[in-house]
């Protein structure tokens, strides 16, 4: 019998969306199965990787993140160009960090100038990301949408409080929206409905379920993304059949462990490799949850994640994937001093001394018991010899007999074996085993008796039921006989009445058995009675 894989049938695919303009167009979504389940459907478009850049120099970034871009980190356009040409970014995400009112509070006009400069420097789609400050984003992103009309930028985040202001601008000037909600499937659906009611078509919306970094936040985000995909494809919810975007870089690199230097906690290892692996693990996890666009920061993360996508889609092994290429020098960490001393002893060797000690303790009472009779014997012999010398010759036989008695007792004591603990233990175990067997026998006998009594009860119940059925049958027969008799008497009475009526009507006596009885009147009643009589019989 050949193996047949069970395949799920999905009610609807993820909508395919075009990002960018003209030759710079990139398609995302369009899959007809759960993430990488190509045995059940098709992955029309592989997940895309967007690289993050800032519109200002990120001073709080650790050295591991700054080092690959140290020559262009102050110029957003050059930075974006390097990400595309050297690191192969599919999309660029420009984070308008300088517009944050809590930091530099750059004007919308300055932000628009940087957006245009970056967009002209690259030949891939551009994501314009705000600061998640509702008032400031409404001003800045509306201005960006207006001044970059027709460029099909991906603008976000758009939340429920800003969906009217930013959403209207995105819809009016031909851009794509990033609908952001705080890790909840119902809120994710709600913001999509609000934007659609505003007039923005669903094929112009990307879902941002809010991305948690590596840790407990990742589990929340993963479960919500999984529910969104299942609701979209299994239950056919068209309001959720949209591609998902995850801003992995910002949430991972802002956590303490990604920025912590080796001096603070050398047990965490190399800070550069640590942060890259944290971002890579988060990104691959979100891919398995159904992400269509990943926003990443480090070039090594981009390389590892891209190779991971290729392996999942095209197949193959990960043996050819190169390890992380460092840009910083290797830190000096004395792992040997921090690690505990190795315990190389075998478990069996550890148990051997314990067993020897237990054997020595068990043998000690035996040796004491053996030596005790030997010490007593010489003393008693000396006592026995003393009376021999002092006593006269006539009484010698009697005294010798008395002296020989202790000797024999000492010999008997010496001949007695020492107390053996193993024998005592065996005897105790035998007694306990016998008692347990006796209890088991009693329980089995009681069970057998209970089963016999139950069978007897069943037999008695069967007999009682049979007798009851017989009595009921006899009662029915008696009732039938009574009914027959009653019917016969009723028939006789009716016949007599019929004769009287006919005689009164015609003035002549009718024959006892008419040749052609009438179909109605008293004769009809008699026919019915006969029919009843037959059925009862």
Image (cartoon, helix red, strand yellow):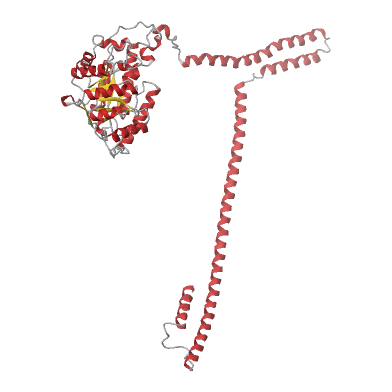
Is 65 situated above or below 35? above
Q: Residue at x 25, y 22 (%)?
A: 144
Q: Nearer the viewer, residue 272 or 321?
A: 272
Q: Is residue 321 left or right of residue 499?
A: left
Please provide percent x and percent y for residue 459.
56, 55
Please provide percent x and percent y for residue 413.
69, 17
Please provide percent x and percent y for residue 23.
15, 25
The image quarter in which residue 150 lies: top left
Q: Residue at x 71, y 10 (%)?
A: 378
Q: Nearer the viewer, residue 187 or 342?
A: 187
Q: Residue at x 75, y 9 (%)?
A: 382
Q: Is residue 193 left or right of residue 387?
A: left
Is 519 situated above or below 423? below
Residue pushed farthest left? 23
Please provide percent x and percent y for residue 533.
48, 76
Q: Residue at x 56, y 14 (%)?
A: 357
- How many dots with numbers? 0
Is 332 situated above or below 437? above
Quick one: quadrant of the N terminus?
top left
Residue 110 is at least partly visible in this image:
yes
The image quarter in which residue 251 lies: top left
Residue 316 is at least partly visible in this image:
no
Q: Nearer the viewer, residue 515 or 450?
A: 515
Is 337 situated above or below 221? above
The image quarter in which residue 142 lies: top left
């Amino acid at each position: 019998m050949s193996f047949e894989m069970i395949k799920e049938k999905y009610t609807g695919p993820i909508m395919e969306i075009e990002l960018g303009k003209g030759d710079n167009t990139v398609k995302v979504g369009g899959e007809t199965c759960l993430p990488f389940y190509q045995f059940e459907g098709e992955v029309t478009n592989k997940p895309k990787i967007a690289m993050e850049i800032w519109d200002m120099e990120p001073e709080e970034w650790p050295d591991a993140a700054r080092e690959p871009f140290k020559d262009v980190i102050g110029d957003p356009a050059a930075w974006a160009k390097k990400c595309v040409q050297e690191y192969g970014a599919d999309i660029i995400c420009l984070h308008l960090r300088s517009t944050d009112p809590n930091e530099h509070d750059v004007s919308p006009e300055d932000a628009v100038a940087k957006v245009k400069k970056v967009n002209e420097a690259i030949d891939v789609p551009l994501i314009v990301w705000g600061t998640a400050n509702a008032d400031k984003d409404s001003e800045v992103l509306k201005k960006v949408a207006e001044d970059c009309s027709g460029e099909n930028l991906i603008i976000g985040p758009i939340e429920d409080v800003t969906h009217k202001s930013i959403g209207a601008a995105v819809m009016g000037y031909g851009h794509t929206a990033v609908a952001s909600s705080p890790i909840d499937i119902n809120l994710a659906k709600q913001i999509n409905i609000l934007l659609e009611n505003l007039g923005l078509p669903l094929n112009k919306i990307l879902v941002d379920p809010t991305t948690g970094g590596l840790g407990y936040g990742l589990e929340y985000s993963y479960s919500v993304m999984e529910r969104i995909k299942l609701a979209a494809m299994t239950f056919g919810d068209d309001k959720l059949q949209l591609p998902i975007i995850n801003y992995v870089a910002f949430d991972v690199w802002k956590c303490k462990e990604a920025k912590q230097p080796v001096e603070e906690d050398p047990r965490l290892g190399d800070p550069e490799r640590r942060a890259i692996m944290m971002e890579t693990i988060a990104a691959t996890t979100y891919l398995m949850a159904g992400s269509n666009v990943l926003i990443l920061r480090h070039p090594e993360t981009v390389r590892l994640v891209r190779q991971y996508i290729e392996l999942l889609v095209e197949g193959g092994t990960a043996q050819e994937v190169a390890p992380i290429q460092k840009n910083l020098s290797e830190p000096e960490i004395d792992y040997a001093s921090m690690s505990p001393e190795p315990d190389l002893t075998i478990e069996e060797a550890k148990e051997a001394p314990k067993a020897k000690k237990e054997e020595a303790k068990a043998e000690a009472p035996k040796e004491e018991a053996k030596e005790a009779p030997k010490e007593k014997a010489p003393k008693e012999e000396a006592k026995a010899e003393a009376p021999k010398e002092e006593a006269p010759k006539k009484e010698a036989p009697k005294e010798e007999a008395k002296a020989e008695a202790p000797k024999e007792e000492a010999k008997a004591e010496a001949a007695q074996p020492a107390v053996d603990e193993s024998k005592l233990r065996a005897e105790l175990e035998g007694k306990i085993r016998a008692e347990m067997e006796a209890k088991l026998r009693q329980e089995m006998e009681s069970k057998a008796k209970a089963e016999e009594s139950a069978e007897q009860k069943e037999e008695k119940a069967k007999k009682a039921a049979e007798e009851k059925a017989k009595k009921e049958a006899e009662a029915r027969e008696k009732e039938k006989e009574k009914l027959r008799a009653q019917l016969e008497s009723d028939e006789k009475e009716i016949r007599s009445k019929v004769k009287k009526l006919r005689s009164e009507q015609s003035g002549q006596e009718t024959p006892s058995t008419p040749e052609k009885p009438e179909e109605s009147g008293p004769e009809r009643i008699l026919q019915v009675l006969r029919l009843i009589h037959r059925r009862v019989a």
